Each structure stands twice: as structure tokens, then as C-alpha cells.
Image (cartoon, rainbow, N blue to C red):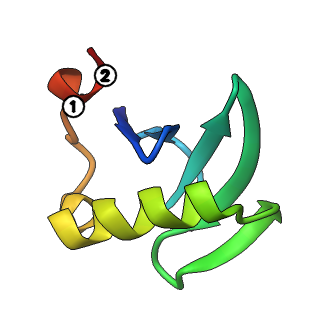
Amino acid sequence: MGRWKRAGVIVVLYSTDHDPRHVHVFEDGKRVVKFDIESWTVMEGKLTSKARKALELLHEEGVFDEKPNIQDDQAELS
């Protein structure tokens, strides 16, 4: 599992989740969007401006280039 906090939202990638490879984005404790990181499309929910910013930052950092053994980004969650 990977878990990151960026732009005020939590982004979670479950390594054992079903295909396509996707993340769950949470704002204020509620999931706002399920987002396909392979095709860069919304699967469920609404892509808010905060969620978009967080996904763009993680993409720029190369986080989504990693494969299943993604480590938690504990420094960012503190």
C-alpha cells in the first residue's frame, strides 16, 4: 500500500487492489474520487481541484512509476 498527503488530500494506492491500477483520493475523510493512474481518467466520483493538484504532484515526483511494493510516504503524513 502507498499512502501520500499532498495539496491537503490523502491519496491511497492499494497494492493488492483490482486492475486497472488506480488510487483512491480522500478529502475530509471521505473518498472523493477513484482515479485510474494508467489512463489518467476518473473511474468514480469527482476530480476536485485539490485532488487534481495532489495527483499532478505525485505524478511529477514519479510516484506512480513505481510498481506494487510502494512504500508509505510517512514524512509527508506527519
Q: Residues within 10 Å of mark 1 (few under 14, many from 20)?
A: few
Q: Secondary structure at mark 1?
A: loop
Q: Residue at x 39, y 70 (%)?
A: 56
Which quarter of the figure has residue 44?
Answer: bottom right
The answer to whether residue 19 shows anywhere in this view is no
Placement of 72 over or under 12, stated as above or below: above
Where does the N terminus fall, quadrant-wise? top left
- 78 or 65, which is in the foreground? 78
Q: Residue at x 53, y 81 (%)?
A: 40
Q: Is residue 17 left or right of residue 31?
A: left
Disc 1 and disc 2: Cα gap in Å? 7 Å
Q: Residue furthest right?
A: 45
Decide: marks 1, 2 in contact (CB < 8 A)?
A: yes
- 78 or 33, which is in the foreground? 78
Placement of 44 over or under 73, stated as above or below: below
Q: Secondary structure at mark 2?
A: helix
Q: Residue furthest bottom?
A: 39
Q: Is residue 29 left or right of residue 39?
A: right
| Amino acid under disc 2 | Leu
Q: Position of residue 10 (x, y in %)?
A: 50, 35
Placement of 9 over or under 56, stated as above or below: above
Q: Residue furthest top?
A: 78
Q: Position of residue 48 (x, y in %)?
A: 71, 61
Where does the C terminus fall, quadrant-wise? top left
Q: Residue at x 21, y 21 (%)?
A: 74
Q: Position of residue 31 (x, y in %)?
A: 74, 38
Q: Position of residue 49 (x, y in %)?
A: 63, 64
Check disc 2 and report the residue beneath it. 77
Which quarter of the figure has residue 62?
Answer: bottom left
The answer to whether residue 53 shows anywhere in this view is yes
Camera-near label (1 vs 2) is 2
Check disc 1 and report the residue beneath it. 73
